[in-house]
């Protein structure tokens, strides 16, 4: 961002600033972990363009930045954060809607002559895709067209209801929405966004897509950033998809009350659409206003029933942050960072902040990150360093565990292992029996339940009941018994129906009698109207115990509906752990009597869960499985007395054979 010369920065101010810069208290540079070289050619005002490494090595708000000269003396600095203007939306003074000539006309009296950026329409309609024309007027008589064919829509969570006003003064705004031979939309209100003050130009942030996972109706991209602590301004999507609309959410991993999860830092709709022959319109940028404490972001793309979106790249931008300092002499200075105990300094130089920001300055880019020789943390505050993540737990005899699977790890470091269907189905409902092992010892882990889901596509099999000819019954065979199915999603090609559905499984009680256990029920209605969903999700209230699901509905006097592919949605569960060696790991599960593990790892769960991860994998179902313990699940006391009884019987048989036979 260019900075024009500021004529008010006088020679007297320069002398005072130089005096202030030289009047700092002494610091101990070895309490800072990192340094970067700053080469200054002449005494003058210097602006330091921070690099990604500078942000990454410093604190979240750069409170530990310090500048020292070649002799180790501290030089006063100013952290230059240009203010980011924020405009707040407001309601118009009048809102009028009329229906005429196959369109809906909205007239808005803004109540202001100030410049406006956007208008946001409000409607309760759940599904629509329309084009709008935007006009403005100063007297409600002479109208000037700003734009035509602007798309507005709401489909599958994606929403676009904002219309640009071009930063113009608009006492009156008129919006005409074409009805496209469909029912008019019920618009209920609007909000106006003033034109914000000019903002600094955001800078590019180095980022790459390091991972992509497909879940049930959702794609999750993992973005690896060049560093932490950069104040993010926007995310931009690069895709060659010609037409699409998707809802996006950007999040970071975090831990609250010892429970791992995600925090959403930005969300909205990105799209590329064309309506009624109008030019293609696109919105590919998502605003952000967040400084992440990790070098990793998660981007959720909600696909609904649409295929996954082809993404070529995701670009990030940040707000500029610079350092300003007065160099009293030419030479090499050092930028110190990496002192978690340091607080933001207070220099007299802050009194000249306005003059310094506008003055001409020499631009210096810091050198590479180096370690400060003799670094040691400050001891006077009594703050202990963060403990390392424990890599090994207590020994464990896994003979009581019915299933054991080899775990493949490619690189040392923090790992993420997702439990597959077999591990999920054969573990305890609370997964308290899951253990990660190496060389007879437990490997501490944190169980992460991120709220994501995967789905199984299953084909229903018609199972008509001759005694109830009006009832449609289907059975669905699952690949495993006991799966924690979260929901069942039904699809149908029938365009008009209203039915009550029941989903259940068949169980057997202690007396050997069969009964039906209800898992979900509810009504499902469909009409031929455009935009009506073809699917209906039913949430299951309990974990299944069998491998067969039953679905039934009473058709009454109507024809039977056609049931298509059924989606069984189940949760994603992961183990997050750290390893130093990549070989010899085993996952054990299937012990109903096992208690939940308690690892000291929970003390550093935040650090572990917010680290970048490698993906670990389990051996295929059935491979690497240890011998099943026939006494698994039986208490040790019963095993002992049973074995003792067998030994006694064997001894009696041997003694009987050794005794002399009675004479005839």
Image: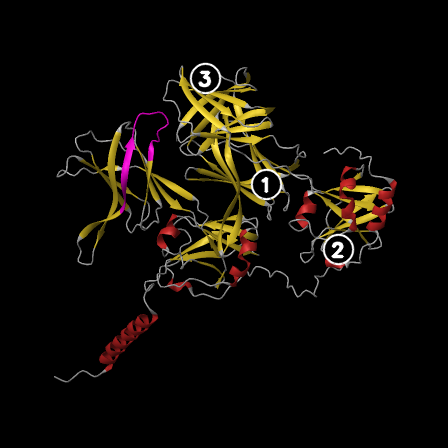
**Earlier sequence position, callout 3 versus callout 2:** 3
Quarter holding residue 227: top right
Q: Residues within 10 Å of mark 3 (few under 14, many from 20)?
A: few
Image coordinates of residue 446 in percent, x first then y, are 49, 56
Circle 3 or circle 2, nearest the eye? 3
Q: Nearer the viewer, residue 5 or 610?
A: 5
Would residue 376 be found to the left or right of residue 143 on screen? right
Name the element at disc 2: loop
> Measured from the top left, where is residue 93 in percent x and y?
50, 29
* Label 1 – label 2 distance at C-alpha: 33 Å
* Label 1 SS: strand
Secondary structure at numbered mark 3? loop
Between discs 3 and 1, the one toward the N terminus = 3
**From where the camera sits, is residue 122 visible?**
no
- The residue beneath circle 2 is 372
In the picture, the quarter occupied by the C terminus is bottom left
* Residue 637 visible in the displayed image: yes
Q: Which residue is mark 1?
A: 289
Residue 23: where, in percent of width, then height?
Answer: 83, 54
Q: Are marks 1 and 2 in contact (CB under 8 Å)?
A: no
Q: Nearer the viewer, mark 1 or mark 2?
A: 1
Q: What are the residue bounds of the magenta stretch? A: 519-535
Of residue 268 and residue 369, the one placed in the foreground of this image is: 268
- Classify 10 Å Cα crowding around label 2: few (below 14), some (14-19), many (20 and above): some
Question: Depth-wise, is mark 3 or mark 1 nearer the camera?
Answer: 1
Residue at image location 67% in from the left, 39% down from the top: 83
Q: Which mark is residue 484?
A: none
| Mark 1 or mark 2, earlier in chain | 1
Which numbered circle lies on residue 276?
Answer: 3
């Amino acid at each position: 961002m260019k900075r024009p010369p500021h004529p008010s920065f006088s020679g007297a101010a320069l002398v005072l600033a130089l005096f202030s810069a030289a009047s700092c208290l002494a610091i101990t540079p070895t309490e800072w972990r990192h340094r970067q070289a700053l080469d200054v050619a002449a005494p003058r005002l210097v602006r330091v363009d921070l690099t990604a490494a500078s942000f990454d090595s410093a604190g979240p708000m750069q409170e530990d930045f310090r500048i020292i000269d070649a002799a180790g003396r501290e030089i006063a600095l100013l952290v230059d954060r240009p203010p980011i203007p924020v405009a707040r939306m407001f309601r118009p003074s009048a809102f009028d809607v009329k229906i005429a000539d196959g369109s809906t006309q909205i007239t808005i009296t803004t109540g202001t002559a100030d410049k406006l950026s956007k208008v946001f329409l409000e409607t309760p309609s759940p599904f629509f895709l329309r084009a709008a024309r935007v006009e403005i007027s100063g007297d409600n008589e002479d109208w000037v067209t700003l734009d035509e064919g602007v798309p507005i829509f709401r489909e599958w969570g994606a929403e676009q209801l904002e219309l640009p006003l071009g930063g113009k003064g608009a006492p009156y705004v008129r919006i005409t929405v074409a009805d496209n031979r469909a029912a008019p939309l019920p618009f209920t209100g609007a909000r106006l966004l003033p034109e914000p003050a000019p903002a600094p130009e955001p800078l590019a942030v180095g980022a790459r897509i390091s991972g992509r996972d497909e879940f049930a109706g959702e794609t999750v991209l993992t973005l690896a950033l060049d560093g932490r602590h950069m104040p993010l301004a926007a995310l931009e999507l690069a895709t060659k998809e010609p037409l699409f609309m998707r809802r996006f959410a950007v999040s970071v991993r975090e831990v609250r009350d010892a429970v791992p999860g995600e925090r959403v830092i930005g969300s909205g709709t990105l799209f590329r659409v064309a309506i009624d022959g109008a030019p293609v319109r696109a919105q590919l940028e998502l605003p952000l206003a967040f400084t992440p404490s990790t070098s990793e972001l998660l981007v959720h793309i909600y696909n609904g029933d649409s295929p996954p979106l082809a993404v070529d790249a995701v670009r990030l931008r940040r707000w500029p942050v610079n350092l300003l300092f007065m160099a009293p002499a030419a030479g090499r200075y050092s930028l110190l960072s990496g002192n978690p105990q340091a607080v933001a300094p207070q220099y007299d130089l802050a009194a000249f902040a306005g003059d310094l920001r506008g003055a001409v300055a020499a631009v210096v880019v810091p050198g590479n990150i180096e370690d400060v020789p003799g670094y040691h943390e400050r001891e006077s505050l009594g703050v202990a360093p963060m403990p390392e993540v424990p890599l090994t737990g207590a020994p464990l005899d896994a003979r009581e565990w019915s299933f054991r699977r080899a775990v493949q790890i490619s690189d040392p470091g923090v790992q993420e292992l997702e439990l597959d269907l077999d591990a999920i189905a054969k573990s305890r409902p609370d997964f308290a029996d899951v253990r990660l092992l190496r060389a007879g010892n437990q490997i501490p882990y944190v169980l992460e339940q991120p709220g994501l889901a995967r789905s199984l596509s299953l084909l229903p099999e018609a199972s008509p009941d001759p005694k109830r000819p009006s009832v449609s019954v289907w059975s669905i065979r699952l690949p495993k018994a006991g799966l924690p199915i979260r929901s069942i999603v039904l699809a149908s090609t029938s365009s008009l129906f209203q039915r009550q559905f029941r989903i259940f499984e068949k169980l057997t009680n202690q007396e050997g009698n069969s009964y039906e256990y209800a898992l979900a029920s509810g009504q499902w209605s469909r009409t031929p109207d455009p935009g009506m969903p073809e699917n209906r999700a039913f949430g299951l209230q309990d974990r299944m115990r069998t491998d067969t699901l039953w679905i039934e509905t009473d058709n009454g006097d109507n024809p039977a509906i056609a049931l298509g592919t059924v989606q069984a949605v189940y949760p994603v569960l992961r183990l997050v752990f750290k390893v130093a060696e990549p070989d010899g790991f085993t996952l054990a599960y299937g012990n109903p009597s096992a208690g939940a593990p308690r690892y000291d790892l929970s003390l550093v769960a935040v650090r572990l869960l917010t680290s970048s991860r490698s993906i670990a994998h389990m051996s295929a179902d059935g491979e690497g499985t240890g011998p099943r313990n026939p006494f698994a699940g039986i208490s040790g006391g019963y095993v002992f007395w049973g074995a003792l009884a067998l030994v006694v019987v064997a001894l009696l048989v041997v003694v009987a054979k050794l005794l002399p036979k009675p004479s005839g």
